[in-house]
Image (cartoon, grey):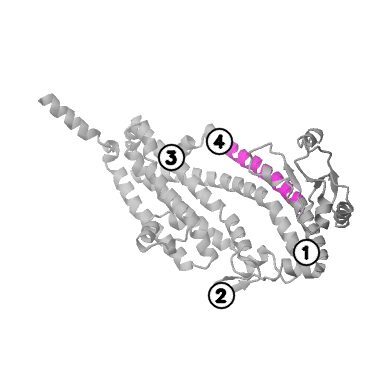
Amino acid sequence: MKFINLLKKELSELINKQMLISLVFVLSVFLIMGNVMQSATNEIVNDAKNPQINLCNMDASDITKEMLEYFNSNGSKVNFVAADENDLAAPFKNQKKLKSYVVIPKGFGETLENGKKPEILSINKVQSVSTFSGMTGGTEGTISLINGFVALKLAEQQGVSEKELGIIEAPLTVTEHTVVADKSAKISSSSIMTKLLTQNMILPLIVMMLIMLTSQSLIASISNEKIDKTLETLLSAPISRGSIITAKMLAAAIVALLNAGVMMIGFSSYTKGMTSAVSEEVSDSIQSAASSVISSSDAMKQLGLTLGAGDYLLIGLQLFITIMICLAISIILGALVNDSKSAQTMLLPIMMMVMIPWLVTLFADVNSLPTAAKFIIWAIPFTHTFTAMPNLMFGNHVAFWGGLAYQIVFFAIVMFFALKLFKSDKILTISLNLGQKSRFKKSSKNNED
């Protein structure tokens, strides 16, 4: 009963109005960003599916008229823009939604009749520095259609048929296959990598943010109690010190899992909004292509790259062990704090242990590194958390279970020292002076002289 009351006390300190408000704020931000990303990607996909031809025609030749009929026969809608060579910005003032247009200058048809490459003008309006602003409303689709018409006309002048032109432009038919272990699928490796990157993007970010938040909260809790002298009162209470440290770690773990749930929902909404429209478009284009080509989702299943409920339970178990390692280290670091300023400094070792494996696994395969670097990276316990999902996907079960066993052993060792520190009176006196002791000795020696 005393342990339950102690756990309630720790939870009441960690779960407060400020924390709940911050969780709601974080979730709201991700939901809003997900909707924004979905809207932006929908606009990009719609532009790709239904390119708007904004055209300013200054050439009255028969070839230009033929080109416009060619556009209409292909189902392309042409929006005519009135512009002057001396004032190319005027159309944007008259049509507020206009983002770009193409100018067919005088002499376009005559140049094409002479068998030469005609010139066109691409006019684009820049009104934002956002990433997606330059991906919508461009002239690429219009230029591609004009290129296709011009290539066809030039080919006709040279006596080349449309079928022959198609063979010249694309002389090879490439069918891509991707192999994973002993399985293969008829799909490009880039499609599989895009799918894998999308799926594996959430867990590393959650792990990194979770470790940071958990460490900071527990280090602050221990250090504040030590600085305020309330830790002495708590340790003198009629309850074992093992129960005290267990209550602190369990309370912090519950809060960490709560944060993880909120972040996972938020990140899932964000990534879904960012990729849903593109995924639907890719799926539609695949279905309309040759029937022998399969979608990326079916290819993932065929290659054995999908995870089941048991796999996600194993990932959750490893994430829990990771949190416990983080908490055990945080207790030791929190006990070394002298004042509130040094509490932030104590977070640096954990940050380094998280950032190094995260960056390495993000850009390289750990097994491909030099032997010395590979052992150093594998010695960091958080590395095995970042590689858990890829190991299960690619069937590297030995690496996964080996990493999990190493984490359990690492946690047992760190927890042993944390318990030993907490059960002794050193928890009240230990500190990391960072040179203060030597300066004090030097000052004392000067006074004696």
Image quarter (top left, top right, bottom left or bottom right) of the N terminus: top left
**In the visual, does 436 lie left or right of 302?**
left
Secondary structure category for the residue under label 3: helix
Residue 308 location (% of width, % of height): 59, 63
Give the total of numbered labels.
4
Q: What residue did someone put label 4 on?
A: 22
Q: What residue type is labelled 1?
A: Ser
Give the residues drawn in magenta, as a range.
22-48
Q: What residue did someone put label 1 on?
A: 288
Secondary structure category for the residue under label 2: loop
Q: What residue did someone put label 3 on?
A: 216
Residue 292 location (% of width, % of height): 72, 72
Q: Which residue lies furthest to the left in this view?
A: 449
> Nearer the N terminus, badge 1 or badge 2?
2
Secondary structure category for the residue under label 1: helix
- Tell me if label 1 and label 3 are in contact, CB under 8 Å: no
- Tell me if label 3 and label 2 are in contact, CB under 8 Å: no
Q: Which amino acid does label 3 sit on?
A: Gln
Q: Is 99 drawn above or below residue 76 in the view shown?
A: above
Q: Is 332 drawn above or below residue 116 in the view shown?
A: above
Real-space CA distance between mark 4 and mark 2, rounded to the nearest whole angstrom: 47 Å
Task: Please name which of the two marks, 1 or 2, marks the residue nearer to the observer.
Answer: 1
Q: Main secondary structure of the magenta part?
A: helix
Q: What residue type is labelled 4?
A: Ser
Residue 54 location (% of width, % of height): 81, 45
Residue 306 location (% of width, % of height): 60, 64
> Nearer the N terminus, badge 4 or badge 2?
4
